[in-house]
Amino acid sequence: MTDTEHAAPRTAVAFREVYGAEPTGVWAAPGRVNLIGEHTDYNDGFVLPLALPHTTLAAAAPRTDGVLRLHSGGADGGVVDLRIDELRPAPPQAGWAAYPAGVVWAMREAGLPVGGADLHYESTVPTGAGLSSSAALEVATALALDDLFALGLERQRLARIAQRAENAFVGVPCGIMDQTAAACCTEGHALFLDTRELTHRQVPFDLPGEGLRLLVVDTRVKHALGDGAYAERRAGCERAARALGVRALRDVAPAQLPDALARLAGAPDVADVQPLVRHVVTENHRVAEVIACLDAGRPRAIGPLLTAGHASLRDDFAVSCPELDLVVEAATAAGALGARMTGGGFGGSAVVLVEEADAVAVGAAVTEAFAAAGYTAPRLFEAVPSAGAHRIR
C-alpha cells in the first residue's frame, strides 16, 4: 500500500471532524519534478515531467445550496466559506483557497454544471519547493468535482481547467505542464508533452533497473511565482516571438538561432530578450536529446544535458539562486552524472542524477556544502515516477 493510500482514511476522518459528515470519496493528485524542459511550456515547447509519490488529497462531498466550503489540514485558519455564484478573480479569494475556488469558477465559466461542495485537503507536497503543489491542489479538486457532479471530463481537459484557474483566477501566468503532469502521468514513466498540440507520450523511465537514482534536493528557499519575475520573463518571450514574426519561440529551430539573435540585437526595443530566446530554443533541443537517449536505453547520457540546462537557466534565463547553483556544483563535484534546478526557479528544488552506489555520498556532499555556506540544511529524497491523479476511495 502506498503512502497516499495509507493517508486516505486519515483524510476522510479529518473531513468528518471538520464537517460532521462522511465524504463521498477521497481523491489524490501528485506533485511533480520536471526532468528537462523549463520555461518552455508557455512558449508552446516541449517538457518532460514525472509525477512524485508526494500528493495532495481531497476528501469531498457535494452540496445543494451553492456554498463552497474549503479546509486544509496544512493551513492556518478554519473553514473558508464562499458562494459559488459570487466567485470572482482576485480577493477576497486570496491565499491557498484561491486555487480550489478558481477551479470551481473555471468549471462554471466553461458551462459545466458544478454546484457547491465541502472539501478538506491534506498534502505531502512541499509548498514553495518548485514541485507544483498548486497544480496538485487544483487537479485534486478538479478530479473530485468531476466525479461528484458526473461531468465525465477527460484528463487533458481537467488539466486545462486547472491551468485556467491559476492563470485567470489566481493570477499566475503558468503554462500547462504542471497541471498535465498531475493529471496524466503514469507510474514508471516520464511524460513527454507537446504543449502546443497537447499530445503526450509516456516515456519509460526505470532508473533503478539501470542502477541509477534521481534525487530531489529541496533547497528550502521559498519561491513565489506570483511576484512578477515569472510574468516578466514570459512577457519577454512573447515580445521576442512578435519581433521574430513567429507564433511562439517553439517555432525557432536550433539552426535558426544565430540569425534570430542577430535580428533581435539589431532592434533596440528587443535586444534585451536575446538570452531568453537562446534558453528556450536550446532547452527545447535538450528535451529532444534527452528523449532520444532514453528511447535508446542510454539514461546515463542525459546527465550532461541536465547540467547544461541548469547553466542556461542560470545564465540566460536568470531564474536560479545561490542555493540551487550550489546543489549543482557540489553534486557534480561529488560524482553526480548531472544536475539542474527544476520548476520555475528563484528557489525551490534541483534534481540530481546519480549512480545508485554514489547516491548517499552525493547527498552528503550537498548537505555538507550547504552547512559550509551557512545555508539551511536541504531536504533530500528520491524521485520515483508515480501515478497521476486518481480516486482512492
Image: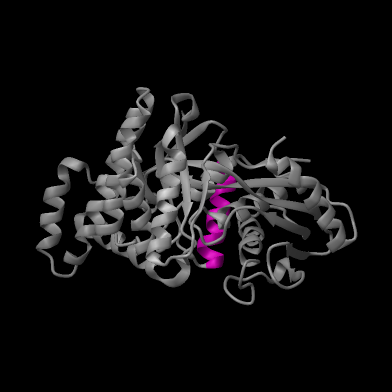
Where 210 sits versus 349, above or below? above
Q: Residue furthest bottom?
A: 92
Residue 151 placement: quadrant: top right
Between residues 155 and 322, which one lies in front from this camera angle? 322
Using the image as rendered, state which of residue 167 and residue 275 is in the foreground: 275
Location of residue 230 with respect to 209 vertically, above or below: below
- Tell me which residue sits at (32%, 35%) in the image: 288
In this view, 322 is above or below 364: below
Q: Is residue 250 visible?
A: no
Q: Residue 186: x percent and y percent? A: 56, 34
Examine the image and state in which quarter residue 78 appears.
bottom right
Q: Position of residue 85 (x, y in %)?
A: 71, 68
Whether residue 298 can be seen here: yes
Image coordinates of residue 155 in percent, x first then y, are: 59, 41
Q: Quadrant of the N terminus?
A: top right
Task: Answer with left or right where residue 195 lies relative to residue 381.
Answer: left
Residue 300 placement (x, y as % from top left): 35, 31
Q: Residue at x 84, y 53 (%)?
A: 13
In the image, is residue 159 part of the stretch drawn in magenta? yes
Left-right relation of 304 to 256: right
Write the start and end of the magenta stretch as one range. 156-170
Residue drawn at point x = 82 percent, y = 51 percent:
12
Q: Is residue 205 left or right of residue 393?
A: left
The C terminus - image quarter: top right
Magenta segment's dominant SS is helix
- Residue at image point 63% right, 58% down: 103
Q: Is residue 363 magenta?
A: no
